Image (cartoon, rainbow, N blue to C red):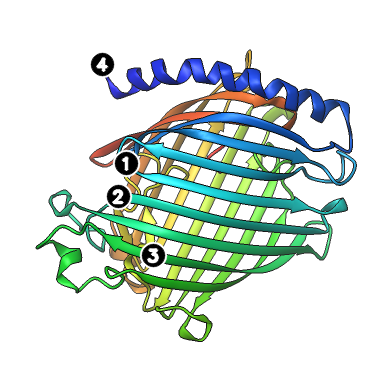
């Protein structure tokens, strides 16, 4: 049985249970403009090349602090999964929007134990260099955002990761001591950003734009074992041709690091949200660029279709981008609508890259 057929047979019964479990949330969202708290327990299913099948559960508490037309829905979430590759992840998260979206506060505490592959640094890293290691430890993040104009936001935050690297394969690259970060350590970061956000919805925009510029700094002065900076420009555009529910979505993501960044903080090609079809971290380096475009069909009986294509690259410096390899990505997918009032969905995507492919099952749109 193929991986896609196995996943489809496993996921479809759970998709129906997820959809049924979401009806109470949908009814509450439609019937009450101020949305009093509502707690829902849902199974979590997923898939990615580096994890295999994922399973677990999540508890969601949704509420709104103002009229539906003005204020976005806040949520509290508890989430835990286990994977076919003996990986485990759990987090507790708060995402709170104030009346009229003037303030947003996000807080998250997480623990994970993940065996992951490493192929080396640079776009020439061969498949034969694959080695596995286990990254484990807690992390915490706090983000505060303030609206200063109708669609303009500024914000800042902090993140701390305490990483332990275990189960390194003897004689391979991570075991030589030449790869920065292979010994683990603490990464403490301060972050600031400015964003213009005109999207009509956070989870599944049909119209509007998001342009966000983010700068992150890690250093010994704030308790980090590594001193480095990271910069990112995330630009997204959404169109609904003909004023219907057909959606075309596009994203450009530019990222770069400076200083002594550990290998797991470098820019990567491959994930479940960008360049689907490549294992997470298949290629990594100090600078990177990803672009993707996606077509999303209208839903028929809570089921929709998507098609996507993209390309990305990594390089050791900006000057070397003209010599960097281009990694293409194409794919198709299904969407199962969970809560129509909030456009919450499950996505099942199959992506192909250069010499690799991947099946992804996750919550909500990729971007």
Q: Is residue 289 above or below residue 330?
A: below
- Kind of element beneath mark 1: loop
Whether residue 345 sits left or right of residue 245 in the image: it is: left
Question: Which image quarter holds the C terminus?
Answer: top right
- Kind of element beneath mark 3: strand
Return the x and y of residue 55 as percentages of the image width and height. Answer: 44, 32
Cβ–Cβ under 8 Å for marks 2 and 1: yes
Reading the image, the residue beneath label 2 is 115
Reading the image, the residue beneath label 1 is 86
User: Which comes before the other along the chain, label 4 or label 3?
Assistant: 4
Badge 3 local density, few (<14 within 10 Å), some, or many (20+)?
many
In this view of the protein, which residue sits in the foreground, 220 or 298? 220
Whether residue 364 is visible to the viewer of this picture, yes or no, is no
User: Which comes before the other along the chain, label 4 or label 1?
Assistant: 4
- Residue at screen point 54% across, 49% down: 91
In this view of the protein, which residue sits in the foreground, 86 or 176? 86
Question: Which image quarter holds the N terminus?
Answer: top left
Q: Is residue 132 above or below residue 193?
A: above
In this view of the protein, which residue sits in the foreground, 242 or 127? 127
Badge 1 local density, few (<14 within 10 Å), some, or many (20+)?
few
Whether residue 119 is visible to the viewer of this picture, yes or no, is yes
Q: Which mark is residue 163?
A: 3
User: Which comes before the other along the chain, label 1 or label 3?
Assistant: 1
Reading the image, the residue beneath label 4 is 1
Q: Is residue 311 above or below residue 62?
A: below
């Amino acid at each position: 049985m193929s991986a896609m057929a196995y996943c489809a047979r496993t996921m479809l019964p759970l998709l129906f249970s997820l959809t049924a479990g979401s009806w109470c949330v949908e009814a509450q969202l439609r019937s009450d403009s101020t949305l009093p708290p509502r707690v829902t327990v849902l199974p979590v299913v997923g898939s990615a090349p580096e994890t295999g099948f994922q399973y677990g559960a999540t508890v969601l508490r949704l509420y709104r602090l103002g009229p539906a037309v003005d204020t976005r829905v806040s949520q509290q979430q508890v989430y835990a999964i286990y994977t076919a590759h003996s990986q485990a992840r759990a987090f507790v998260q708060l995402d709170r929007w104030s009346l009229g979206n003037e303030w947003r506060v996000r807080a998250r505490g997480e623990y994970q134990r993940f065996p992951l592959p490493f192929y080396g640094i640079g776009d020439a890293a061969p498949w034969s260099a694959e080695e596995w290691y286990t990254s484990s430890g807690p992390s915490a993040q706090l983000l505060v955002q303030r609206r200063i104009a109708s669609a303009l936001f500024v914000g800042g935050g902090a993140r701390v990761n305490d990483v332990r690297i275990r189960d390194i394969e003897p004689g391979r690259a991570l075991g030589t001591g030449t790869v920065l970060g292979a010994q683990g350590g603490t990464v403490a970061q301060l972050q600031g950003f400015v964003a213009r956000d005109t999207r009509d919805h956070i989870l599944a925009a049909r119209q509007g734009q998001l342009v966000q510029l983010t700068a992150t700094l890690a250093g010994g002065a704030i308790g980090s074992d590594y001193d480095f900076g990271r910069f990112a420009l995330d630009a997204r555009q959404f169109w609904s041709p003909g004023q219907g529910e057909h959606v075309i979505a596009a994203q450009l993501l530019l990222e770069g690091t400076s200083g002594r960044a550990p290998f797991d903080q470098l820019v990567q090609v491959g994930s479940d949200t960008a360049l689907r079809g490549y294992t997470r971290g298949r290629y990594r380096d100090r600078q990177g660029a990803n672009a993707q475009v996606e077509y999303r069909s209208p839903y028929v009986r809570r089921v929709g279709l998507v098609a996507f294509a993209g390309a990305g690259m990594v390089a050791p410096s900006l000057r070397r981008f003209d010599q960097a390899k281009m990694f293409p990505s194409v794919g198709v997918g299904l969407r199962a609508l969970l809560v129509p009032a909030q456009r919450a969905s499950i996505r099942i995507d199959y992506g192909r890259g250069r010499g690799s492919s991947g099946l992804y099952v996750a919550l909500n749109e990729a971007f």
